[in-house]
Every structure is written in structure tokens, then in C-alpha cells.
Image (tube, grey):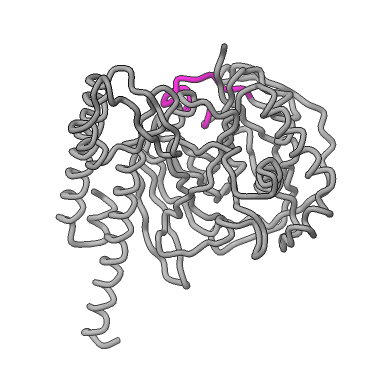
Amino acid sequence: MNNGCLIFAFNNEKIDYIKQAKELAIRIRKHLGLPTSIVTDVQITTDVFDKIIVIDEQFPNIKKTYHNGAFNERLSFKNSARIKAYDLTPYTETIVLDSDMLIANDNLSKCFNQNNSICMYDNSFDICAFRKTLEFTWISDIGCKFYWATCVYFKKDKQSKLFFDLVNHVYENYLYYKRLYQINSNVYRNDFSFSIAAHIMNNYQKGDFIGTMPDTMYYSLDTDNILEIKQDNFLFLTSINNKKMLVKTKNQTVHAMNKYDLEKLL
Amino acid sequence: MDDKLKNALEFANYANTLFNQKKLIHQNFLDACVYYYDAGKFSIDQQLISYCKNCLTSKNNILLDDNSIPIKISNPKQFIKNITDIYNSNIEDYYNEYQNLIKQKSVQGLIDE
């Protein structure tokens, strides 16, 4: 029985996801005491990872708008390898994480104390509490509950194998499911395929196939700026209705979506 | 800008930031109070502690967890001690954080705190 974390990191024209992954692996070791493996498409030499899994992935030509506060640009978005997490993980129990997570406490280690095969966040907390972001509650106006693929815990067992096979099926038939669930976004998101798979595994009902995570997912949007990363304290400049507000988090794990600031500060 | 309006807006900005920081530390406190026992998830609060101290015995030793799953508590004494310790430690941190926050009378103070 071995537990660990898995990070998918594929650099694009501007964003160095591998650099983020290295920093995250160090934080995982410090707070969760777990080894981390990375899945990437280039050879890297570093001792922060337990295993470096290089895959030859042919990504579809998808561009996504990346925000850096008020600035934005279109860049390649290579996110589809995540659906292979079940086959690629070297661990019996795994936490898959986005490289832009800033781990600042040991709450995630509690995942290993429960019995569910898969756990995902459906409860999230915008660090700017005044914003109402329904897009992280439902996948669309008539769609199902939103689950974050940003951080997924799973055991290697029959149930999670079924689940990941289904996620693969949703990915392969994404145009159909996008129409069925009336998803407005043109960009494929793992959050959507994981949420749809969870809905199907619950027999298209509200159910408990997906377990709850031990805490709340805190997130800052990519339109926010990250001003400071001082050990486990982070300072953000958020905006709501064109008004700016400073937010400080202390010892709270945050999904910080502004990749530009993150890279600058790491 | 009129000074009265400017002062009011400055205060509103401070009040907003304070409110937001309060919500963050409260949520952090709630997250820290999650305790797992025999794969059951328990969000420790005053009600749970009170109920356990009054009703949880070696005979009546089944509790409903956060997901409405019945969990048998094989060692009620130890369970009560654990949840009480976790709660007390976290609420003390929360209290200290809260007191530090409300002492600050400017946005800069809230952020530097």
C-alpha cells in the first residue's frame, strides 16, 4: 500500500507548468508528507519527484484564454492527459492535483482516512466572498452538479476504474455530452467530464458515488493577482465590480488560477 | 470628491476587507475541525461534543457522521477526548486570529496582521 500525489504538467508557449509542479511537490512533501510523481511530455532532471512519467501525448489544438489580472491572451491548453490518471498513477491511493495549487496545510492527508473510492470537491470558497460564481456550482444552467477535477482523490479499485473509463468515454464523445448538458464553454474542461461522469455514475441522479473531500476548496480567479507568497501566507488582489480588494490567506490551501503571477513568485 | 464621501468609501473598503477576512478565518476554523474516525467524517462542533459527553457510552456508541453514515465508536472515552482536544485547540487559534483582526483599523493593518 503506497500513497502519493500525481501532477500533470505540460508547458505551453508561455506557462511553465513543470516549474509550478516542482514547487507543489515540495509543498506536498512538507505538509502532507507524501511523495509526488509528475506526468509530462519532456525529459526533466530533478530530485523533487518520486517518479517522472514521460508520455508521448498528442494533444488536440485547443487554445484557451489565460488571464493575468486585466491582461489576457490565447495560449495552447494541454489538459486532456488527466483522464489517464488511473492508468498512470504509481500509487494505490492517489491525490491528483493541478500544478497551480498552493498547499499550505495538512487537511488533504485526511483523504486517506475514509472509505470512498473517489473524492472530489463540490464545495468551494471564493477567497473574495462577495463574488457569486455559479459556474462552480453547476456545470450549466440545466446541467448537473459541478465537481472540481483540480484535486481528485482515488483508490485503485474497480469503482474508480469504472469511473475513469467513463471519464474517457465522455472525453471521446465530448461534443455529444457538451450538447446534452448544454455546456456553453467551447474549451474542453476536465471539470466538466469528471462532473458528467459523476452524474452518470449516480444513475443521472443526485447521489453519493463521489465522496466529500475533508475540507473546502479555496480558489482565486485568474483575473485576480497574486501579490505575495510568503511561506504559507498568500496575498491576493481580487476584483469585484471593478473594485479591488486585498485578501490574505494564512495556512489555507488555495487554488491560485493566475499562472503568470504564480510563476513569477515561485 | 467630498471629504464625507471619501471617508465613508475608505471605511467601506476597510469594512469589506474585514468582513472577507473574518469569513476566511471562520471557514478555516470549520475545515480544521473535521475529524475522521473509522472512516466516518465528523465536523466537530459544540453540539457534537455536548451530545457525546452526555449520551455516548460504551452501550450507546453509534453516531451519525456528516454523510449520515452510522459509525460505531469503539472507544467513546478516547473519541470524546480527541474531538474535545481538536475543537479546543482550533477554537483558540480562531479566537486569537479573530482578536488580531478586529484590532486592526485599516486595510493595511488587516493585510499585515
Q: Is residue A25 magenta?
A: yes
Q: Visible in this render: residue A72?
A: yes
Residue farthest top in this picture:
A1
- In the image, residue A155 lies at what x, y percent? 61, 24
Q: Visible in this render: residue A99?
A: no
Q: Is residue A197 left or right of A151 when viewed as pictured?
A: right
- In the image, residue A34 lies at what x, y percent? 50, 20
Residue name at image x 55 percent, y 49 percent: A257
Q: How many marks?
A: 0
Along the viewing direction, whichever of A130 and B60 lies nearer the viewer:
B60
Residue name at image x 79 percent, y 50 percent: A62
Q: Is residue A246 left or right of B113 when viewed as pictured?
A: right
Q: Is residue A39 magenta?
A: no
Residue farthest bottom in this picture:
B2
* Magenta residue span: A24-37
Q: Is residue A128 above or below residue A100?
A: below
Q: Is residue B81 left or right of B61 when viewed as pictured?
A: left
Q: Is residue B44 above or below residue A228?
A: above
Q: Is residue A180 left or right of A156 when viewed as pictured?
A: right
Quadrant including the N terminus of chain A? top right
Q: Is residue A243 above or below residue A145?
A: below
- In the image, residue A55 lies at what x, y percent? 78, 26
**Residue A184 occupies which quadrant of the picture?**
bottom right
**Residue A103 occupies which quadrant of the picture?**
top left
Q: Is residue B88 above or below residue A4?
A: below
Residue name at image x 37 percent, y 23 percent: B72
- In the image, residue A38 lies at what x, y percent? 64, 26
Along the viewing direction, whichever of B49 and A74 lies nearer the viewer:
B49
Which secondary structure class fits the magenta region best? helix
Along the viewing direction, whichever of A71 and A50 lies nearer the viewer:
A50
**Residue A216 occupies which quadrant of the picture?**
top left
